[in-house]
Image (tube, rainbow, N blue to C red):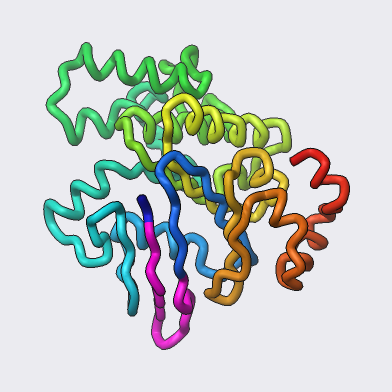
Amino acid sequence: MIRFDNVVKRFDGREVLAGVSFTVEKGEVLALVGPSGTGKSVTLKHLVGLLTPTAGSVWLEDVEISAARGKALEAVRARIGYLFQSGALLGWLTVGENVALPLRERTNLSDEEIDGRVADALSAVDLADAADRYPSEISGGMQKRAGLARVLVRRCDIVLYDEPTTGLDPVTATTINRLIRKLNKERGVTSIVVTHDLQSAFLFADRILMLKNGHVVEDSKPAEFVRSSNPDVREFLAAQFIMPDLLEKKL
């Protein structure tokens, strides 16, 4: 469904992506991991046309996103939801109004239809009772979930997550990780999740792809990832105090 074909991206002569190639199948959850500054968020931005490759191409099925313009690019973006690190809620709108915003701005749905879809999206992220509260009145974890509801209300079949558990306590982070998996199982959502947290990735990912210095250094299932002999992977595991022999038994 999604394909990166030898993608190179340079900024002012600095190469951030150095020939990245991978695919994501429909309904798959891919965790994109690696050190800071290695091109993970840059990779996501290529998928929604916020960036175009210096070389190579990015595809969604038979549409080349990297070459799409105008209505063709709008059609691609309509299929993709993007959850930012902060949740990006508007403080002067209630949670329900925030979730409804993309429908009110981009569709001709009736108020009744919008209200129904908002209620459904909030229920999916366990925020049905928070519709009338403002972002300042809810926790950071709830704000992340509200941001996810705003993505879901558009009924996208692809969701991109940029560090969804950053700044959250372990319990709340686990809630977000379970939601990612729940949405994949119940709605068939294809997901790419940028994260530094390997423990989280092991909870929700079908595959883990690791970038370092703009290169793909590992692309494997979680159980294979922890057994990798690649020194970059071993170093990344060790830095998070992950003991492969113990973790492998859980995967």
**The stretch drawn in magenta includes residue 165:** no
Q: Is residue 223 above or below residue 108?
A: below
- Looking at this view, is 55 or 86 the one in front? 55
Viewer-side residue, 218 vs 35: 218
Q: What's the magenta region? A: 3-20
Residue 204: name its quadrant. top right
Q: For the stretch drawn in magenta, what is the main secondary structure? A: strand
Q: Residue shown at 74%/41% (left/top)? A: 251
132 sits to left or right of 172: left
- Residue drawn at (61%, 31%) of the image: 178
Q: Residue at x 87, y 46 (%)?
A: 246
Image position, residue 104 (x, y; %):
21, 28
Q: Quadrant of residue 205?
A: top right
**Location of residue 54 in the rendering, given as x and y in whole percent from the top left corner:** 33, 78
Q: Residue at x 71, y 31 (%)?
A: 171
How far across and down, in percent of the image, does residue 116 sit? 30, 14
